[in-house]
Image (cartoon, rainbow, N blue to C red):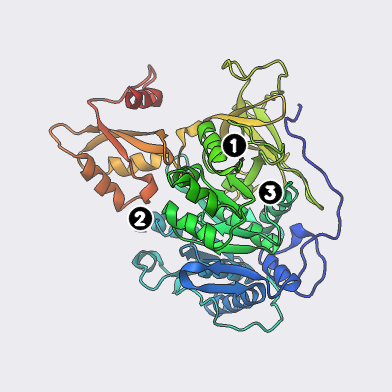
Amino acid sequence: MTDCGVASQSNETDAGARTAGGAVESVLAGNVADLVAAAAHRGPDHPALLEPGRGLALSWSELDAAVTAEAGRLVGAGTRPGDRVLIRLGNGARFCIALFGALRSGAIAVPVGTQTTERELGVIVADCQPSVLVAEPDDTAASNTAGAATVLPPPEPNSTPSSGQSADSVGGGEDLAVLGYTSGTTGVPRGVQLSHRALLANRVQIAELRPVPVSPADRVLLQLPMFHLYGLGAGLLQVCFAGATGVLVDRVDPAEVVEAIRTERITVLAGVPSRYRAMLELPAEQLRAALVTVRLCTAGGAPLAPDLLRAFAETTGLSVFEGYGLTEAGPLLTTTLVGGRTKPGSVGRPLPGGPGVAGVELRLVDADGLADFEPDEDDEFDDGEQDTGFVAVRGPNLFSGYWPDGAGGPDEDGWFRTSDVGFVDADGDLHLVDRANDLVIVSGFNVYPREVERVLDEHPSVAESAVVGVPDPRTGEAVKAVIVLCEGAELTEEQVREHCATRLARFKIPSVVEFADRLPRSATGKITRLALRGERES
């Protein structure tokens, strides 16, 4: 078999992570919380986290001290190595401290979005059985679903002065660091087991890109939700790896985000396509002036439309480099930064390797993982005849299977077949053309139709339902529901949304609701989702 992406291999060097005592260790054997200690060792007074909305500024030494205090608080609450600590907080310094405190104590961090409903939270709690939930005091959903777990309020960012010493972290390497929940294809959330090794490997791989995505001198806008691996890994953890400055914002209004970019002198932006499109709705002169300090823009989580890529460059003079990743990959796999230029429709090439860390390998396979497809230099890639296959990847940044037994992870040769379908062009750049399992991506967040369908079918007036994704200029895709009512029943679009609002996160609620006499089916009785999408376009 021929690999479509060639991993960059590097020899072991002394560029591994440094512990608080300064000893050099292999980066893959370390603890993710050691990134904070290493940054504090290199630049104790350098700004680590800024939270303009609260007037908060923490240096790396102050953040390190707060993390140590939080680790002690969790241990005092009964947390033991390997226990799960569920963190349900918004984008702020308290989330960061809670996360690194859990990791330093040897626990497994389980970040969960604040939009998660009580029902969804209950499923996750029952599955991972956390010993502690860190949530706001008025979070009734956390209190109602905690079970035997201890519910703790968020840690105070500046409650402990720096002593100049960092506590040793417990565990690392192949020990699990983060359990990231993503909806399964059956609608049941599945916990993605990410080891310290996987998360640290992805940091090294990304740091080898040129221009370097995050340097110590950068001020990075952390606007993406950090319970999501895109915001957590490529955002917060990359800031820690570089010892840069992260500016935390919990805003979605484009005018407020752009104002934060201007006032905080942001140099690096990472976002989903819908955020960049929202920025373009502002006056061009205002946008250009606000982004004058920005040197690099990256996008992921959803396809970046070629027209958006062009419009943003024409308006701001800035290119947006697109990437592709998965929660299961910690998260980044490919980026157009590898090739050094943007390419409309492409998500770039596999990440290179770094000191002591192999790069990402990528190939295309059939449904059984048996076939390989080589790029054809004679293909024009615009005639619809390209060889496509499922994207399969291999690398040290891959997950350790799904919770709790590691099932579904990389095979014995280290390869993981994704549910994404694409082709590789003659330059070695990956193009994604479809997604298996009918996954819908709304503003970078995964929505599995079966999960929404289960909720819809619980309504007493619904006989059956089907959910598909349809194009949306703001969010990339929107959730569309087609509903068949029980005989004699009546139901409005608003009632459907009200029913979903108490059971699903906001981005999963159907924004398009249609009623039909029956659902289109194939000869074998399977719902033809393509026809449902066609109904929307007609």
Which residue does the image show at 33% across and 41% down from the upper left? 510
Label 2 residue SS: helix
Instruction: Evaluate if marks 1 and 3 touch, with contact meaning CB atoms under 8 Å apart.
Output: no
Identify the residue under disc 1.
418
Which residue does the image show at 39% across and 56% down from the upper left? 115
Identify the residue under disc 3.
397
Instruction: Tell me the kind of residue under disc 1.
Output: Thr
Left or right of residue 431: residue 212:
right
Q: Earlier in the sequence, mark 2 or mark 1?
A: 2
Q: Looking at the picture, tell me which residue is in the foreground, 16 or 49.
A: 49
Foreground: disc 3 or disc 2: 3
Q: Earlier in the sequence, mark 3 or mark 2?
A: 2
Left or right of residue 142: residue 264:
right
Q: Which label belongs to residue 119? A: 2
Q: Quadrant of residue 333?
A: top right
Instruction: Tell me the kind of residue under disc 2.
Output: Arg
Expressed as whole percent of the image width and height from the top left, the position of residue 228 reads: 52, 53
Q: CA distance from mark 3 to mark 2?
A: 31 Å
Q: Is residue 150 above or below residue 184?
A: below
Expressed as whole percent of the image width and height from the top left, the position of residue 289 reads: 54, 52
Dot 2, how many residues are within 10 Å of its Cα: few (below 14), some (14-19), or many (20+)? Answer: some
Label 1 residue SS: strand
Expressed as whole percent of the image width and height from the top left, the position of residue 243 reads: 69, 64
How many marks are shown on the rendered structure?
Answer: 3
Quadrant location of the N terminus in the rendered image: top right
Label 3 residue SS: loop
Q: CA distance from mark 2 to mark 1?
A: 28 Å
Residue 218, visible in the rendered structure:
yes
Q: Looking at the picture, tell me which residue is in the foreground, 406 or 224.
A: 224
